[in-house]
Every structure is written in structure tokens, then in C-alpha cells.
Image: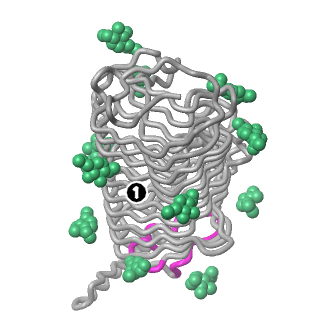
């Protein structure tokens, strides 16, 4: 057995070279030095060595083994570039297929790259509610000061892009195309899901999927602008309630388009749960060909077996501004529906709303007076 320590005093890096075992097998830990900063092929064995010695990591045409996470956690002051086709073996497990954490990380996709989830291998119309276990796709968690640029996701097995417990995150030009799920059994293929995160700036997202385009479950100061959402459930706050963190504060959803979707914009809170939604702005939203609800504000949400019809009042929904929202709903849908417990909605301001086409009127509850809010 041969052991070499190289400690480079005076430099910021301390490199402890690999422990070489006579069998020829190399352990690269506690830290190893990578021979290249490019990860490619069908193994992720080099990843720890690359993470500990590279500040510019290139991940290129990688086939991640089945049941394994491409684990880019614990990274700091590093840029990660994805190139070519990043694909994943098939296993029935919870994922995520890719996980990134750390601080000061730039994540960039090169022109022509793709994360190919090949979701059809799992799709069975049941999503997260049953059938085979489907992995979540891409997650950033405990990432501080991260910039994500130009990622392209194809056919997510279920939820595509999660931002959990992060601070100071910018996400620009991400494409999530799970359109094949429309005809091949995709379900719960949420695009962007935010929990427990602060200062998140998402811009220029393009989504084709079968669930929420955006779902903000908890967090503060979340911005989502210039999105195009097609085929899913619209741009949502919630569901809020019945989780560890049930507080949503200051969300700005602006300059976006939602087409061929169940809902345009919505806030949904879990029936009889507690929590808080405070400060939501929807401004300059265009919707087209919405099947169910143009604008939906409901306090009776339950995933299974479905909304109860009787809203609770444990989740106040304060300071909701909806301005310059227009578009069309299919004839059997409802343009605007509000179903909230008495006193839940306070300090709302709605103005310049023009949604038409839906002919199904529903009995509303909890519309805050003198707010401009209405049902139609
Ligand atoms: C590794 O990535 C660098 C930087 O993009 C590139 O110049 C080089 O050709 C790559 N090497 C291999 C072996 O892929
Ligand atoms: C990330 O990109 C910004 C420019 O957008 C640059 O200033 C910064 O140094 C980069 N950080 C890393 C860790 O590469
Ligand atoms: C990506 O690679 C996988 C595995 O090699 C392959 O099955 C898939 O078709 C590729 N996807 C694209 C978009 O080229
Ligand atoms: C987030 O950004 C702000 C403003 O740039 C900075 O003061 C703060 O330290 C950052 N937070 C983290 C966790 O890095
Ligand atoms: C991470 O987020 C969860 C859910 O939002 C929350 O319960 C937990 O306290 C957070 N952890 C930290 C360290 O912030
Ligand atoms: C409103 O949003 C659309 C995209 O849907 C954008 O093209 C337009 O510039 C926005 N208007 C303003 C005033 O920002
Ligand atoms: C409207 O949306 C439905 C999906 O709900 C879609 O099948 C149909 O093609 C869309 N119609 C138009 C005119 O885009
Ligand atoms: C919500 O609370 C009300 C009043 O306590 C109760 O009647 C109702 O059954 C509860 N709903 C659910 C789904 O638990
Ligand atoms: C209302 O919410 C918006 C965010 O949507 C925020 O900018 C504003 O400060 C809030 N106003 C009050 C009075 O809380
Ligand atoms: C309206 O009809 C479409 C199909 O034509 C269906 O998908 C949708 O669920 C219906 N909406 C409601 C609110 O029943
Ligand atoms: C609350 O969460 C639990 C566990 O996920 C779930 O079983 C239950 O149905 C949820 N309750 C409601 C009202 O959604």
C-alpha cells in the first residue's frame, strides 16, 4: 500500500492524493485528484475526485447508472457545464436523478445538450399517486448564490425541477419539454417547484407538461417572469399547508403566457391546514384555451380524493394583486372562481382583468369586499 500526501501550503488548495491499494482498486477519499475535470461515459465513479479538485467541471454525454443520483452536492466556487446527452438508467426509485448543493455555483447547459429523462419508461398515468415509483428529475437544495442558465430537460419521469431550501438563485432560459407525456401517460410532471427558498429569480422558462408549470409551496421573494407554459395546470401558489413549512411571502409572477392548460393562475391551500400566504402579484398574464379555471383561488384543496368543496380558514391569503390578466377559457370551464373561508382573503387588489369564454358559473365564497375581486 502506498500513501502520498501532498500538502500545498500557501495555496488555497490542499490535495491529498489517492490511496492506492495493491489490488489496483483506487479509493479517492477523503479527497482524490481527478485526472480530468470532464465526466463522461457510463460511470460516475470519478465524480468525488472531480468535485474535490476541479473548479470547472464539464459533464458530457454521461449515462448515469440506474438508481444513482448524479451527486453534485457540497460544491463551492465552481462552474458546471453540461454538454451532449445526459441520460439515466431505469430504476423504480424516488431519485432525484441530479442533485446540486453548495455555494457560488454556476450551472450552464451548452447549446445542443439535453437531460433526457426518457420518462415514458415510467409513465403509467398515475404519477406520484401510484403505479411504479418514479424518480424526481433535477433538484437544487441548500444551494446559495447559484446561477442556472440554459438547461434543457426532455420527458421528465415526474417532477422536473425543484428548488428547495435555497437562497439567492437565478434560473434563466430553462426548457422543460415533457410533451410526450400528453399521449404516453405522463402525470405529476410539475415543471418548477419551490420550497423553503428565498430570493429566487426565474426568467424565460418554456414548459410543456401535465401538471403545475410553477408551484410555490413555501418561500419568500420568489420571482417568475417571461414564462411560456403549455399543457399543464398553470402557474400556482400551493398547495400551501400540511407540510413542515407553510409560509409563502412575496411572490411576483409576471409577463407570462399560459396555453392549453387546466388553469391559468391559481392559489390553492389545503383544507383545514394552517399556514400563511402573504404578498402575491400576478401582472401581465395572457392565457388561452384554458379548460377548467382562468383564475382559481381555493381553500378546500385535497390531493386525494380531490377538493372537498368546503374551504377552511387556517391559511390567511393576504395582499393578492392581480392586474392586467386576460385571455380565454373553454366553454365548459369557469373564468374566475373563488372559494375561501370567511375572512381568509384580505387586502386584495384586482384590476384590469378580462377573461372570457367560460360559461360554467360556480357559487363563490369569501370574496374580499372593495378589492376589485369577482367571480365570473
Ligand atoms: C473537456 O472539456 C474541455 C473544456 O470544455 C474541452 O476543451 C475538452 O476537449 C474536454 N475533454 C474531453 C476529453 O472531453
Ligand atoms: C459565475 O458567473 C458570473 C458571471 O455571470 C461570474 O462573475 C462568476 O465569477 C462565476 N462564478 C463561478 C464560480 O464560476
Ligand atoms: C440520450 O442517450 C440515451 C442513452 O444512450 C438514448 O437512449 C437517448 O435516445 C438519447 N437522447 C437523445 C435526445 O439523443
Ligand atoms: C444573498 O444575497 C444577499 C445580497 O447579495 C447577501 O447579502 C446574502 O449574504 C446572500 N445570502 C446567502 C445565504 O448567501
Ligand atoms: C428546509 O426546508 C424544510 C421545508 O421547507 C424546512 O422544514 C427545513 O427547516 C429547512 N431546513 C433548513 C435548514 O432551513
Ligand atoms: C407582457 O408580457 C408579454 C409576454 O407575455 C411581453 O411580451 C410584454 O412585453 C409584457 N408587457 C410589458 C409591459 O412588460
Ligand atoms: C385546447 O386545449 C386542448 C387541451 O386541453 C387541446 O387538445 C386543443 O388542441 C387546444 N385547442 C386549440 C385550438 O389549441
Ligand atoms: C374540516 O373541518 C371541518 C370543521 O371542523 C370538518 O367538518 C371537515 O370534515 C374537515 N374536513 C376535512 C377534509 O378534514
Ligand atoms: C404586497 O405583496 C407584494 C408582493 O407581491 C409586496 O411587494 C408588497 O410589499 C406587499 N405589500 C404589503 C403592504 O405587504
Ligand atoms: C371541459 O371539457 C374538457 C374536454 O372537452 C375537459 O378536459 C375538461 O375537464 C372540462 N372542464 C370542466 C371544468 O369540466
Ligand atoms: C396531509 O398529508 C398527509 C401525508 O402526506 C396526507 O396523507 C393527507 O391526505 C394530507 N391531508 C390533506 C387534507 O391533504
Would you name the residue on which mark 1 appears?
A: 223
Q: Residue 58 in the image: x percent, y percent? A: 54, 76
Q: Residue 351 in the image: x percent, y percent? A: 42, 44
Number of numbered discs: 1
Q: Is residue 39 magenta?
A: yes
Q: Residue at x 44, y 48 (%)?
A: 323
Q: Residue 35 in the image: x percent, y percent? A: 51, 81
Residue occupying the far right of the picture: 183
Magenta-drawn segment:
36-56
Q: Quadrant of the N terminus?
A: bottom left
Q: Residue at x 46, y 16 (%)?
A: 308
Nearer to us in this view, 176 or 288: 288
Q: Could one spot residue 114 in this view of the protein?
A: yes
Residue occupying the far left of the picture: 10
Mark 1, other Cα within 10 Å: few <14 / some 14–19 / many ≥20 = some
Q: Is residue 224 magenta?
A: no
Asked if 332 appears above or below 239 in the picture, the reply is: above
Residue occupying the far bottom of the picture: 10
Q: Is residue 278 left or right of residue 79?
A: left
Nearer to us in this view, 126 or 255: 255
Asked if 317 appears above or below 30 in the picture, the reply is: above
Residue at disc 1, secondary structure: strand
Q: Residue at x 63, y 32 (%)?
A: 132
Asked if 142 appears above or below 2 in the picture, the reply is: above
Where's ligand 6: which quadrant?
bottom right
Q: Could one spot residue 68 in this view of the protein?
A: no
- Display colour scheme: one colour
Q: Residue at x 29, y 46 (%)?
A: 249
Q: Residue 66 in the image: x percent, y percent? A: 61, 50
The image quadrant of residue 222 is bottom left
Amino acid at each position: 500500500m502506498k500513501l502520498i500526501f501532498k500538502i500545498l501550503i500557501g495555496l488555497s488548495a490542499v490535495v491529498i492524493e489517492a490511496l492506492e491499494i495493491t489490488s489496483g482498486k483506487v479509493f479517492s477519499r477523503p479527497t482524490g485528484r481527478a485526472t480530468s475535470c470532464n465526466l463522461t461515459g457510463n460511470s460516475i465513479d470519478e465524480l468525488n475526485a472531480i468535485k474535490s479538485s476541479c473548479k470547472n467541471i464539464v459533464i458530457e454525454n454521461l449515462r448515469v447508472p440506474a438508481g444513482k443520483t448524479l451527486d453534485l452536492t457540497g460544491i463551492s466556487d465552481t462552474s458546471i457545464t453540461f454538454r451532449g446527452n445526459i441520460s439515466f438508467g431505469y430504476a423504480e426509485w424516488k431519485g432525484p436523478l441530479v442533485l446540486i448543493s453548495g455555494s457560488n455555483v454556476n450551472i450552464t447547459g451548452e447549446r445542443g445538450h439535453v437531460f433526457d429523462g426518457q420518462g415514458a419508461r415510467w409513465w403509467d398515468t398515475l404519477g406520484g399517486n401510484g403505479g411504479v415509483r418514479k424518480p424526481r428529475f433535477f433538484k437544487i437544495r441548500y444551494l446559495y448564490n447559484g446561477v442556472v442558465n440554459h438547461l434543457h430537460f426532455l420527458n421528465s419521469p415526474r417532477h422536473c425541477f425543484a428548488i428547495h431550501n435555497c437562497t439567492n438563485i437565478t434560473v434563466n432560459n430553462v426548457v422543460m419539454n415533457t410533451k410526450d407525456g400528453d399521449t404516453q401517460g405522463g402525470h405529476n410532471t410539475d415543471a418548477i417547484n419551490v420550497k423553503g427558498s428565498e430570493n429566487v429569480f426565474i426568467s424565460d422558462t418554456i414548459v410543456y407538461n401535465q401538471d403545475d408549470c410553477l408551484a410555490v409551496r413555501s418561500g419568500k421573494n420568489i420571482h417568475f417572469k417571461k414564462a411560456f407554459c403549455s399543457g399543464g395546470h398553470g402557474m400556482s401558489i400551493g398547495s400551501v399547508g400540511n407540510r413542515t413549512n407553510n409560509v409563502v411571502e412575496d411572490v411576483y409572477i409576471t409577463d407570462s403566457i399560459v396555453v392549453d392548460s387546466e388553469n391559468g393562475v391559481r392559489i390553492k391551500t389545503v383544507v383545514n391546514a394552517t399556514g400563511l400566504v402573504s404578498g402575491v402579484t400576478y401582472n401581465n398574464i395572457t392565457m388561452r384555451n384554458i379548460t377548467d379555471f382562468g383564475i382559481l383561488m381555493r381553500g378546500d384543496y385535497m390531493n386525494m380524493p380531490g377538493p372537498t368543496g368546503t374551504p377552511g380558514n387556517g391559511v390567511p391569503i393576504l395582499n393578492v394583486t392581480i392586474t392586467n390578466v386576460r385571455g380565454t377559457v373553454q366553454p365548459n370551464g369557469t373564468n374566475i372562481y373563488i372559494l375561501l373561508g370567511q375572512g381568509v382573503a384580505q387586502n386584495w387588489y384586482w384590476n384590469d382583468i378580462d377573461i372570457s369564454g367560460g360559461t360554467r358559473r360556480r357559487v363563490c365564497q369569501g370574496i374580499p369586499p372593495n378589492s376589485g375581486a369577482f367571480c365570473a
